[in-house]
Amino acid sequence: MLPPDRTPTLSPAPCSPTTAPAPWSDVSSAGAPTASASPGSSDAAARVARFSGFRPEVQGLRAIAVLLVVVYHVFMGRVSGGVDVFLLISAFFMTLSFVRRIEGGRPLGLGRYWLHTFKRLLPLATVIILFTLALIWLVFPRTDVAEFRSQGVASILYLENWALAANEVNYYAADHSTASPFQHFWSLSVQGQVFLVWPLIFALAWFVKRRTGRDSIPVLAVCFGLVFAASLAFSVVTTATQQEFAYFDTRARLWEFALGSLLALAVPYLRVGRGLGVLLGWAGFVSMVLVGILVDVQGAFPGWIALWPLLSAAAIIVAGQTGSPIGFDRFLSWGPIVRLGDAAYALYLVHWPLLISYLVVRERPVAGPRSGVALVVVSIVLALLLTKFVENPLKRWKWPEARNWRLALVIVICMGLVLASAGTWSAVERHRTAQLEARAELNNPGARVLEPGYEFTGDENAPTLPRPEELADYHADLGSKCPSDIDIDSSVRKYCTEVLGNDDAEKTVLVLGNSHAQQWIPAIKTYAQDHNWRVIAYVGQGCFYTEASQQPKTQPHCAGWFEHSEHLLTSNDFDTVFLQGTFASVESERVNENLTSAIRRLTGRGTTVVGIRDNPRFKEGLTQCALALGRDDPQCTQVPPAVRQDDPQKALADGIDGYVTVDMTSFICPGGSCHPVIGNVYVFADTNHLSAPYGESLIDAFGDQLTEALS
């Protein structure tokens, strides 16, 4: 998505890598070099000329690619392959630019290249990020504010792809209204990372040429060929095993850039006749459009199937300027299309936050036909205006170009504006939260209002905690890294932590499971402090302590986590093990047979096992319902089937000596009904986790039940 930097010149002389290609005045109508730059020529100017010239049909290809992205996002909710084409084109132009300099025998000036590139990219990105932050503040649900604000910071730092990968974002979610307005910055982040790494490969070729006199083209071909093969293999494997992570993984995308670089190295030596050029151009266009229609990209991108749009675009580039009145290049070179290609960067940046904001305001999962057309038109108009009045003037601004420190200053200012805005906003929110929490014991008692004889003396008008933007922060602190005396396989040591250290502990206990076990750690830690215990945790997010075959396929790390759990339990002397004793769903709750077998093995070795009953789960979040409809709306109070039955693990506890249970259901859903708010605290963070403040309000009740169970 690198914006074009076109400085037309008719000279084939060497150009700086920060200067865009000149018009291809020295190419034939078929797009091949003229005789003055024949393959056998040893003249430096002729070699440079091969890689010189502005190609309007490739600039027009940018326009087609970005239109595919916008149209498929707005109307079809699918991936078009347009972003992949952008990645290929950016590497194509970068390679042409650097090869001109290498073959011209000029220094590469990598420092200035990096400064110039990000000076061009960041100003417009900064405008869009600040605009999006304003939209988030104005119209987005408060539950999403904190996460999206941090993604704005990740976007300006070119780390958004890794933030999305870490959060296991589903890029193909049918309901776009739940998506991040910064989600599209993933590809820009990947590009930014490649813009830092790719020049190092050119530096290697430059160094080899300078030392040995060898032609840089074969060296670059080998380097990019190796990157292509390794990254494509990695992409295919990770797409098959971790598709949602692979989609945002830079390593799984490098082959797309490498293909663009290989194409740039090859195109100057290819001779394509007019007839074949016309055929390649139209076939490439039709093929590229059909990708999003015919391919079910779910579970496929960015693996080998991404070759489809890339090879389609490559066919158009190889076709070049055919000179034919029916050639597709004639359309691509048309002035309005080229100008739209010039605005492709702005159009890509602006269309997504507009789309997501509209869906949030209208509470729709997708845009309708009329609203979709309006969104596309508004996005194009805004992109053209931003390009004309923001991007182009800043590109022509001469003051930063005079000194490298000035270029760096522009970069620092752009990043600083976003970091300062997001940081100040975050600091204000933290201060307000701290003030509310200081009075929380009186104003937000949570489950303590269920204690016999409790009388509320706080402010009835106090805000409910947690604040909506802090609901997602429900994961309890797991403590410090796993201590050295815990015997555990090195491959899973990262899942082991020390929640509470105690050299003179009377007991060492283990919290075993996933986030549903983790949410009880504050209560277990408080109890442990009162009873001189040491607490170790072995938590695998999304994993189940049942059996290997029951681990979620979407969580590939769970297989190893579960496999090594037995070694952890048998090789260490844990007096007590806390685990999730039941497994609830929206419809039911049960005790897993494989867990029963594991419990018998543990208690048979003299270990006390505490089974904590799972909390109810819902199709829609009660808290989210209360935020939308009001906390007293009857639709936000539910009675799940599991709440109406006794704890399913009671019979198991009666039949196994050493197995005891803790059931907090009466404090989570008192009287058999699950309410969104108890004691001025939101009970649930989402559809299946307790909010952090409500979990903390259960500490005393949990301790009482645990004392009774262990007595």
Image (cartoon, rainbow, N blue to C red):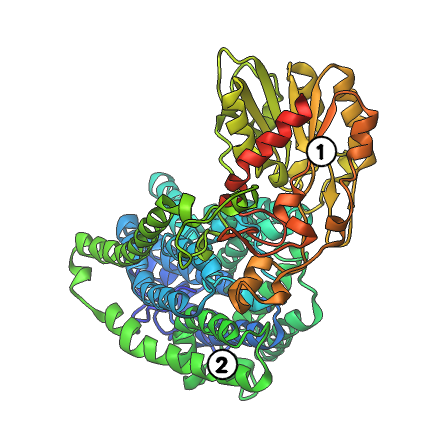
Query: Which element is circle 1 on?
Result: loop
Q: Residue at x 63, y 66 (%)?
A: 635
Give the quarter of the figure containing the C terminus. Answer: top right
Query: Which element is circle 2 on?
Result: helix
Which amino acid does the dot numbered 2 rest on? Val
Mark 2 closeness class: few <14, some 14–19, many ≥20 residues within 10 Å? many
In this view, 55 is above or below 445: below
* Residue 653 location (% of width, % of height): 78, 28
Mark 1 closeness class: few <14, some 14–19, many ≥20 residues within 10 Å? many
Question: From the viewer's perspective, is the residue at label 1 or at label 2 nearer?
Answer: 1
Q: Is residue 271 visible?
A: no
Outermost residue, front direction?
Answer: 453
Q: Of the residues under marks 1 and 2, which one precedes in the sequence?
A: 2
In this view, 128 is above or below 668: below
Q: Which mark is residue 376?
A: 2
- Front residue of 426/277: it is 426
Outermost residue, top direction?
Answer: 504
- Front residue of 101/340: it is 340
In this view, 318 is above or below 102: below
- Front residue of 486/107: it is 486
Q: Quadrant of residue 341?
A: bottom left
Describe residue 515's horizontal placement relative to residue 459 as left or right: right
* Residue 608 location (% of width, % of height): 70, 20
